[in-house]
Image (cartoon, grey):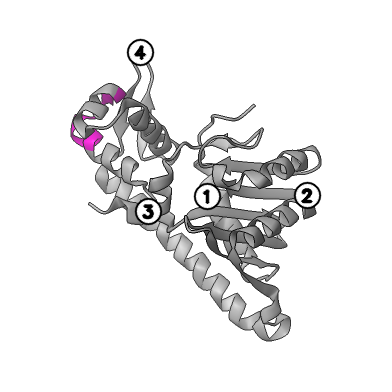
Amino acid sequence: MDLDRFGFTPTEAKVYLALLPLSPATGYAVAQSAKLARANTYDALEGLAGRGAVTRLPGRPVRYAAMNPDALVGRLRREYSSGLDSLADALSQVRRVESAVGLAAVESLADRGSLLERAIDCARSARSELLAVVGPWAAETFADLEAVRDRVSARVLSLGTPAPAGAAVREVPAREIEAYWGGLPVALVADRRRAVCGIMRSAGDAAGIATEHPGVIPFVRHLLRRELASASPQRVS
């Protein structure tokens, strides 16, 4: 079943399908059934719990229960319908304002250095709010992501370690991230007025944009807020 089309990582999809007939079950039992390492299984279970697809039951040992498939499908339908509605609104707004703001409102970034440079500039420009999703592949941004916390409301998710101090962490193998995203993601939104987002590839190139476009930023911010809302409570001290 192609659950990764709906925001599940490949490991999360495998763990959910293994848990479904066992539910409720311990992480150990799920790992055995899914034929996965226990550490990867527990990471996936926590990720699924964060998005509501799995419930962590009280007691010792901790057991997990999978959301009823019909309920999960209904929830995904609502989430993706809302996301598509937001996308339609954003694209319509882009079309309406394009003649006023011009194509210069969106800068294309085609290499790793340019993407990281714009990401750092975006973090430094924040005056009230910063949302960011990064990973170990963007370590050059960490110092600025840490410094910005002293002056603004900053929420940062790192898809692995090492990570910026104060960031929430979701450990996901790089190969799974690349399979899902087509590369290694870097995304920031500052003050609802400036955004940088893109992916890095193993060859050293990148594909991304830097923009202050009023029709693009609300949609990017919406996606980052959803990603941050599902982040693991684990934080880097």
Q: CA distance from mark 1 to mark 3?
A: 20 Å
| Element class at badge 1 | helix
Q: CA distance from mark 4 to mark 1?
A: 31 Å
Q: Position of residue 75 (x, y in %)?
A: 37, 50
Q: Secondary structure at mark 3?
A: helix
Q: Which residues are magenta?
A: 18-27
Which residue does the numbered mark 1 point to in the structure image?
226
Mark 2–mark 3 Cα distance, whole angstroms, equals: 34 Å
Disc 4 marks which residue?
Answer: 60
Q: Which mark lies nearer to you, 4 or 3? A: 3
Q: Sequence order check: which comes first, mark 1 or mark 3? A: 3
Q: Mark 2 against mark 3, which lies toward the viewer?
A: 3
Distance Cα–Cα, label 4 vs label 3: 35 Å
Residue 82 appears in view? yes
> Whole-Å distance between the Cαs marked 4 and 2?
42 Å
Please name the amino acid that badge 3 sits on.
Ala
Q: Which mark sits nearer the N-terminus, 4 or 1?
A: 4
**Mark found first going from the N terminus, 2 or 3:** 2
Secondary structure beneath dot 2 equals loop
Judge from the rendering whether residue 120 lies leftward or rightward of residue 234; answer left or right. right
Q: Residues within 10 Å of mark 3 (few under 14, many from 20)?
A: few
Q: Say which residue appears at 66% left-offset and 33% top-offset.
A: 165
Q: Is the magenta region chiefly helix, strand or loop? A: helix
Residue at 52%, 57% (x, y): give it: 200
Q: Amino acid at mark 2?
A: Ser
CB within 8 Å, label 2 to label 3: no
Q: Which residue was labeled with disc 2? A: 128
Q: What residue sits right under mark 3 in the picture?
A: 179
Comparing 27 with 181, the one in front is: 181
Q: Is residue 206 left or right of residue 52?
A: right
Q: Amino acid at mark 4?
A: Arg
Q: Position of residue 87 (x, y in %)?
A: 51, 68
